[in-house]
Image: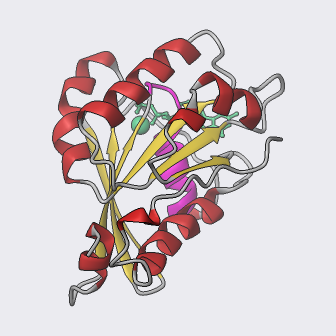
């Protein structure tokens, strides 16, 4: 039985989500939009911002991890306990794309069990001159991670683009796990079409 199937079988259907990414990536803004349905100003997260949401029958406990360098050493403990990893990427921050790639690969190869679904949110898509999904998939070498379940979603906390769809994907991973509980071969690559 896979980890999500075990989870789904519990009386309390609660999933733990770790949300990480570089400082200024847009993590807290996404959660604020989800909570309030609109864009809100933020201040940098000093440590961890914990939010709880209900979606369908699931309750989601989201650990929004401060992305500044000083807080990154605290990520592993949260990522190791997560059922889903969300990595938020500022699609307009081309300069720090190599750094974002490095910390993403370090996080998933070091602290993130292979069974954990990964959602990459390519955010700030309301801005001009942002990286396309095709470019991000190529640059992050995501197709080499074929043994993992990965989904990449365009989002914007200014317009709400893709935010509900992202959390719906998380919800669907839990629901789907019910039907693939006995199959270890259920890992899939769920990359969207480039665009
Ligand atoms: N244009 C635009 N700006 C955004 C978007 N999301 C966040 N921002 C801005 O980006 C900056 C950082 O946003 P935060 O949500 O605080 O970033 P964070 O990832 O939580 O940063 P840390 O807490 O330091 O890790 C803020 O000035 C936001 O207003 C977006 O979708 N579009
Ligand atoms: Mg924050």
Q: Is residue 111 left or right of residue 184?
A: left
Q: Position of residue 96 (x, y in %)?
A: 55, 13
The quadrant holding residue 183 is bottom left
Q: Nearer the viewer, residue 139 or 41?
A: 139
Indicate yes or no whether the magenta region holds residue 30. yes
Residue at (28, 43) in percent of width and height: 112
Give the extent of the magenta segment. Answer: 22-35
Q: Position of residue 79 (x, y in %)?
A: 26, 44
Residue at (53, 57) in percent of width and height: 188
In the displayed structure, 192 sits above or below 11; it is: above
**Figure quadrant, ligand 1:** top right
Q: Of all residues shown, which one is farthest toward the top? A: 95
Tell me the quarter of the image containing the N terminus: bottom left
Q: Of all residues shown, which one is farthest toward the bottom? A: 11
The quadrant holding residue 61 is bottom left
Q: Is residue 71 left or right of residue 87?
A: left
Q: Position of residue 157 (x, y in %)?
A: 64, 47
The quadrant holding residue 195 is top right
Q: Position of residue 71 (x, y in %)?
A: 25, 25
Residue at (48, 73) in percent of width and height: 171
Q: Is residue 86 left or right of residue 142?
A: left
In the displayed structure, 21 sits above or below 16; it is: above
In the displayed structure, 62 sits above or below 49; it is: below
Q: Name the image colouring.
A: secondary structure
In the displayed structure, 27 sits above or below 163; it is: above
Q: Nearer the viewer, residue 11 or 118?
A: 118
């Amino acid at each position: 039985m896979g980890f999500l199937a075990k989870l789904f079988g519990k009386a309390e259907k609660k999933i733990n989500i770790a949300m990480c990414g570089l400082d200024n990536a847009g993590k807290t803004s996404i959660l604020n939009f989800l909570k309030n349905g609109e864009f809100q100003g933020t201040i940098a997260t000093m440590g961890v911002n914990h939010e709880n949401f209900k979606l369908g029958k699931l309750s989601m406990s989201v650990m929004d991890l401060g992305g500044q360098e000083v807080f990154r050493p605290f990520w592993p403990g949260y990522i190791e306990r997560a059922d889903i990893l969300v990595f938020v990427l500022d699609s307009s921050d081309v300069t720090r794309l190599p750094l974002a790639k490095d910390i993403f690969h370090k996080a998933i190869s070091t602290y993130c069990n292979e069974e954990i679904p990964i959602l990459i949110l390519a955010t700030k898509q309301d801005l001009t001159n942002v990286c396309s999904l095709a470019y991000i998939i190529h640059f992050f070498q995501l197709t080499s991670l074929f043994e993992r379940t990965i989904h990449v979603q365009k989002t914007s906390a200014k317009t709400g683009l893709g935010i509900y769809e992202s959390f719906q994907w998380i919800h669907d991973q839990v629901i789907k796990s019910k039907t693939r509980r006995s199959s270890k071969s259920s890992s899939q690559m769920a990359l969207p079409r480039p665009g």
